[in-house]
Structures are given as structure tokens and as C-alpha cells.
Amino acid sequence: MFGYEYEDYLLFSWALYNCSSKYWEIDKDNFIRTLGEIFRFSETKVKTLINTFLINREEFIVLYEQFATIDPKMKVYDFNPLLMKPIVTSNGSDLLFPMPFSIFIAVTEGMYQQICTAKGLEFKSAFGKHPYEDYIEHILKLHNYLYIKEFVYRFQKNNLRSPDFMLVKNNHVIFIELKARVPMISLRTTNYTKYKEELKTSLGAALAQCFKKEGHLKSGFINHEKLPKNISRISHIAITLEEFNIADETGLEEAIKENGGVLSDSSYHVMSTGTLESILEEDTRDIFQYCIDREEAGTTNRHLSDGDVKREKLTSTRDQNLMELIVKKNNLISK
């Protein structure tokens, strides 16, 4: 769909952001020549990469107005075209880059939304079952969590699947269900009520699965060598790709029941992938203590999950190391 390997787009975004650290207006010809020299990209390739994220001023205005809400209270949720097309040009001008960090949103969520728009729900389903689960496993492994991936178990002569992930620490088990299929981004502003209801339905379906499988675990149908013999605490987490989430006890409980779930004494949490990353990367607590603190404080349904993350300035060179690996792989610097 985009013409080149995803790594090419990552390299391009890194180079563009690096250039923007000095200038927010970038000479197009010089930039094309520079990328050709550094990354050995052809001129055609660089132009294609640029055009993927390029929008002219008139198109920007049209796109913004297309999704803009008339409700002044909801303006904060208006779709910002720069999150998908962060490079602006006007009348053949050089490349204007007013929000440098937006290139990293565009090269991740922005490209994902473009694919979803073009491919529809079938792609979202496939994405949720494969790359999304792989990524969550990657970051859990990166932070040395003990986890159990989804496996098949027998229940009343049927083959069922365990939670996408079960995290284990001592006698505490966390059930994680992932939902890649979330409301289209345009609904945030064109129909906020429908957007919120669709998000509740998606989260309710995930949490209903958690509670059903908790019952199967307690009944002895779910067994695994990594599970503790005496489980003292179970927590449930529904994770979506949607950064905007909700804190709504009544609505979520109704959605869980509508999807056939039966609530237990266990608490549940809903969060975005970004919030999970923040807990793992920035919070001095692990995910288990994060859940315990919210559950004991009673904030699981009163606070947005991101609001309960205790962010500390933890030093990490992981992102820098990752970029160096990408660059080395492309033979751009000496090993």
C-alpha cells in the first residue's frame, strides 16, 4: 500500500525529526539529496516517502473542517490532520514542519489508520490476532514479566482459548485481553455518543471474556504449569489501540453483562497500549502493584487509567539503541 518497507519509513521519520531540531522549515531539494546520500535512497523513493506525509495548506483546512465538531466543549477532541500528514506545503514552498514530534505519530498510528480506512474491519481483525499480540508479548518480554500466552483448553466438550495473556507474580494473576478493533477515529468528533458506545462495547466484550475465563480457571478447566497453586488475587485488563479511554463503571458493567460476562470480586481495568507502555517504561511500580494500588484506592472506574500512572524520569537508552540497530542493519554507520 505504501510502496516501501516499513523500516524505510522509520528511517525517514528519524531523519526528518533530526532535521527539525534546527529548522521547522526544510529545504526540500536539500533534504532529498541528504537522504539519498545518508540512506542510499533514490530520489523517487525519497519523494514517495515525503508525499506519504505531505499535505498542502488548502487540503489541511478542508480535512480539518470535515471532522471538526460544532460543539465547543468537544473541540479538544477534533482530529488534527498533522497527526497523519505532518508535513505542510503551500504554493510549492519548502517543507513546513510545525509539529516535529507528530511524525512519530504519523508513522505509527497515522499509517495504521490509513490502512484500516483502506482495508476495513477484516484488516483490524487480522491485525489484532497477529502483529498486535506479538507487540504486546515483545514489551512484556522486554521487561522480564512471567506470562502465559493464549492456549486451547477443554470446557464442556468444547475447545476454548485462554486469555490473550496471563501475567503471573507470586499468587497474583492478571488476565489480559486485547482489542484492536476500536471505533473509527472520525467518530470522536462526528458522533461522540456513538464513539463512546462503540468503545464501551469493545471493552465490555474483552472484559466479559476475562470474567468467563476466571470462572473456568476457578472451576479447574484452565490449567498451566506456570499458574500458582493458590491464587489469592486476580485482576483483569482490557487493552485497546485507542488512546482515548473511558472511566464509566455503570456503562462498562452493562457492556460486560450484555456480552455474557458475570462479575466477580475481581477488579478490572481498561487502558490503551500507550498507557501500558508508560507503566512499563516510566512507573517505578510493576503492573501488578499498579493494579493493586488502583483497586485498593477504588479508582479503577473513577480515574482514567493513564491518570494513575506515576511517571518518573527513568533513564533508558532503549530507543537510542533501537535506532542504532536499524541504522546498522542498513549499513549506514560502521559497526
Image: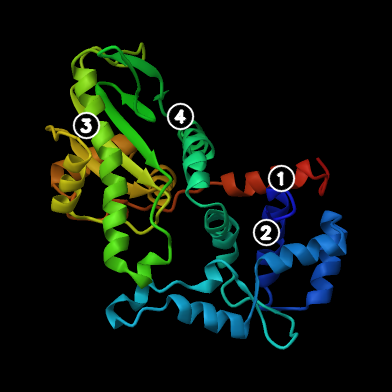
What's the CA distance linking mark 1 and mark 3?
41 Å
**What element does badge 4 sit on?**
loop
Amino acid type indicated by mark 4: Asn
- Residue 22 appears in which quarter of the rendering? bottom right
Q: Earlier in the sequence, mark 1 or mark 4?
A: 4
* Contact flag, marks 3 and 2 (Cβ < 8 Å): no
Q: Where is residue 199 in the image (x, y as percent from the top left)?
A: 31, 54
**Relative vertical location of residue 22 with respect to residue 319 in this rendering, above or below:** below
Q: Percent x, y for residue 279? A: 37, 45
SS at mark 1 in the image: helix
Please indicate whether residue 93 sits to the left or right of residue 294 in the image: right
Residue 169, located in which quarter of the rendered image?
Answer: top left
Residue position marked by numbered label 3 in the rendering: 211
Q: How much space separates mark 3 and mark 4, taking CA atoms?
A: 26 Å
Residue 180 point in image, percent of width and height: 43, 45
**Mark 1 belongs to which amino acid?**
Ile
User: Looking at the rendered structure, which numbered label has been put on residue 326?
Assistant: 1
Nearest to N terminus: mark 1 or mark 3: 3
Q: Is label 2 in contact with label 1 (beta carbons under 8 Å)?
A: yes
According to the picture, the residue beneath numbered tag 4 turns out to be: 144
Q: Nearer the viewer, mark 3 or mark 2?
A: 3
Work out how far the residue at label 3 is from the one at label 2, CA to CA, in angstroms.
42 Å
At x 13%, y 32%, the residue is 264
